[in-house]
Image (cartoon, helix red, strand yellow):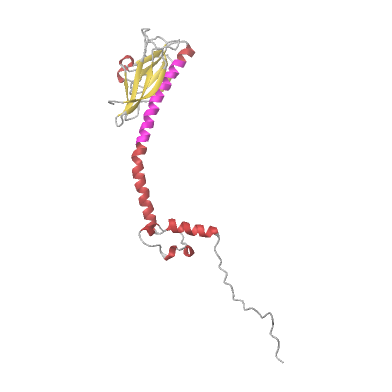
Amino acid sequence: PHPHPDPHPPHHTTPHHTHHHPPSQVRHVCVFFILFRCPMSLLHPIRQSCLPRFCPKGFTLLEALVVLLLLGILVALAAPAMSDLQARHRLHAQAGAWLDSLVLARTEALRRQQRVTLCSRGAGNSTCDRASEWQNGWLVFADDNGNAAFDLGEALIESHAPLPSGVWVDVSSTVKGYFSYNAEGRSQTNTDAFMAGTWRFCRGASSGGWKVVVNALGKPRMEPYEAVTCP
């Protein structure tokens, strides 16, 4: 007798090949290396050594030279702009320093209840020189005798250094050598007339400047202006 066939013959299973995909972090790292590790791929096809499975480490000498060249170009382009920015900041700082000195002199006149004077500084750093017209700096002092000159025995409140190279100040004719505040905080000449004036700070390489304006009441303010000429 013939044996009955098995109703459930065994199935031959084919082996399944499992593909192990690298983690997403590894794929991202390798994509990064393709885009940024191989800058020369813009000139020729991506080299086999830059495929994801062969992600290289470090930089070649040629790539380092390309990066240094690009950095040098960027620095050369940015240097003039940075130099101009520093010069404009220096100009603004000098105009701001003069404004601060005016505010200080007015405050001290009210506090001391006496005349306080600002004068253009002389060569001796402790004398007034009206001919220097503020370019050599200035002094702030308690003007006991009201003669607009820093005399022996008078209290020195502040001494400011000369203006830096390239910075100039042009003043109106009414305030060529000194500026005074009386005990009430009003600007006043040594003959008791009111004072008002303008100091224009500029630099030769730029048309923009800053001016400090003091009105007849002695209140100072600072504002930008377009310099037509700069000494």
Residue 156 in sight: no
Q: Is residue 32 left or right of residue 17?
A: left
Can you see residue 224? yes
Q: Quadrant of residue 207?
A: top left
Q: Where residue 134 appears, x then y in whole percent?
A: 34, 21
The residue at the point 37 percent across, 19 percent down is 213
Residue 143 among those drawn in magenta: no
- Residue 9: percent from left, percent from top: 66, 81
25 and 115: which one is in front? 25
Quadrant the C terminus occupies = top left
Task: Give the residue at x 47% y 13%.
Answer: 110
On the picture, is 87 further left or further right than 33?
A: left
- Chain part drawn in magenta: 84-107
Q: Report the predominant secondary structure element of the magenta stretch.
A: helix
Which residue is most to the top? 192
Residue most extreme to the right:
1
Q: Residue at x 47, y 56 (%)?
A: 32
Q: Is residue 96 magenta?
A: yes
Query: How many marks do you count on the picture?
Result: 0
Q: Indicate the quadrant containing the N terminus: top left, top right, bottom left or bottom right.
A: bottom right
The residue at 35%/51% (across/down) is 69
Q: Which of the 4 quarters of the picture holds residue 152?
A: top left
Q: Measured along the vertical axis of the image, is residue 203 above or below residue 108?
A: below
Closest to the observer, 158 or 216: 216
| Image vertical order of residue 226 relative to residue 29, above or below | above
Q: Position of residue 118 (x, y in %)?
A: 39, 17
